[in-house]
Image (cartoon, grey):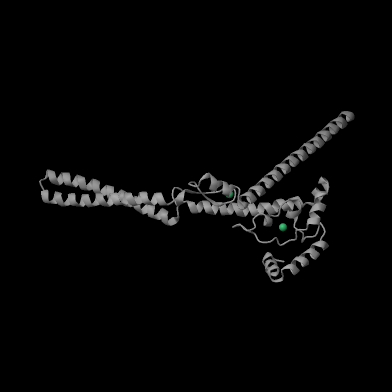
């Protein structure tokens, strides 16, 4: 049943639905596909973010406590045979992948927008054009002055003065634009690289602590830690398998060499 439908049913039926759930979970066995494997192996991501911005809603699968107890009691090799840890890792990986996507998007939002880039380009071009106008104007004034064309020199001087004022204004606009856009603007925001929330660099320690001990941040931190540990473990396991294989190959080579010696 889709999470959305379940939530609706829960609202409509209240306790009755809860009872329905219990009777349903009583029929489940460890291998039932309706049983949530993330819940059995550790913590279901749906339980990590309740009442936060990242609330995933209720889990579409069943969380049966008796099955969790049963699973916990299994030996390591029995657990490995069931392969639930793999499903759990994949589930966490999916949620962390989505979180990483949100972090990237938030990061991009802190960078300059296309409009800000365009306006910056226009202002830079304006400033460079005006600089050239001023330079050429000053040269013109000198030549006109040397030739005694005082009236023409005066009107050229007026043009240069106007260009100078325009250039100063463009420089002020450019500074204002770079102050309010990009990473230096937006109230000194930065993106939390664990959960993707915006943090203000102006926040005091208490507010930062509120964030780092908040449900959403801790939820992602826990998932990342678990997944990291799992990855390390499987790496170690791979290396151990590699060693066993190498030993096997070494034995084979030794045996072959012996056979060859016998043949001689
Ligand atoms: Zn679940
Ligand atoms: Zn965070």
Q: In the rendering, at what x and y percent does residue 122 appear?
A: 36, 54
Q: Is residue 226 left or right of residue 262?
A: left
Any part of residue 221 in sight:
yes
Q: Residue furthest right?
A: 262
210 or 142, nearer to the observer: 210
Q: Quadrant of the N terminus?
A: bottom right
Q: Is residue 64 left or right of residue 150?
A: right
Residue placed at 80% from the left, 37% from the top? 244
Residue 26 sits in quarter: bottom right
Q: Quadrant of ligand 1?
A: bottom right
Any part of residue 193 in sight:
no
Q: Residue furthest left?
A: 148
Q: Quadrant of the C terminus?
A: top right
Residue placed at 75% from the left, 65% from the top? 18
Q: Tell me: residue 4, above or below residue 232.
A: below
Q: In the rendering, at what x and y percent does residue 185 appear?
A: 44, 50
85 or 237, nearer to the observer: 85
Q: In the rendering, at what x and y percent does residue 252 appear?
A: 83, 35
Residue placed at 70% from the left, 52% from the top? 90
Q: In the rendering, at what x and y percent does residue 113 appear?
A: 45, 55
Residue placed at 23% from the left, 52% from the top? 162
């Amino acid at each position: 049943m889709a999470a959305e439908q379940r939530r609706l049913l829960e609202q409509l039926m209240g306790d009755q639905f809860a009872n329905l759930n219990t009777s349903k979970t009583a029929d489940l066995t460890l291998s039932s596909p309706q049983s949530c494997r993330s819940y059995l192996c550790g913590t279901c991501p749906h339980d990590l973010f309740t009442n936060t911005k990242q609330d995933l809603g209720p889990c579409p699968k069943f969380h049966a406590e008796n099955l969790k107890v049963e699973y916990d009691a299994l030996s390591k090799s029995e657990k490995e045979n069931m392969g639930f840890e793999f499903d759990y890792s994949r589930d966490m990986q999916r949620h962390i992948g989505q979180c990483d996507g949100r972090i990237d998007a938030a990061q991009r939002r802190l960078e300059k927008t296309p409009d800000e880039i365009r306006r910056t380009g226009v202002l830079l071009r304006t400033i460079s054009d005006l600089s050239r106008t001023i330079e050429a104007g000053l040269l013109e004034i000198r030549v006109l002055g040397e030739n005694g064309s005082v009236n023409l020199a005066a009107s050229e001087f007026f043009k240069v003065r106007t260009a100078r004022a325009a250039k100063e204004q463009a420089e002020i606009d450019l500074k204002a634009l770079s102050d309010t856009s990009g990473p230096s603007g937006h109230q000194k925001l930065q993106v939390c690289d664990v959960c993707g929330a915006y943090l203000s660099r102006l926040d005091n320690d208490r507010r930062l602590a509120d964030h780092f001990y908040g449900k959403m941040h801790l939820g992602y931190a826990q998932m990342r830690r678990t997944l990291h540990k799992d990855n390390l473990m499987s790496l170690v396991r791979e290396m151990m398998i590699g060693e066993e294989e190498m030993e096997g190959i070494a034995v084979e080579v030794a045996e072959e060499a012996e056979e060859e010696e016998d043949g001689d």
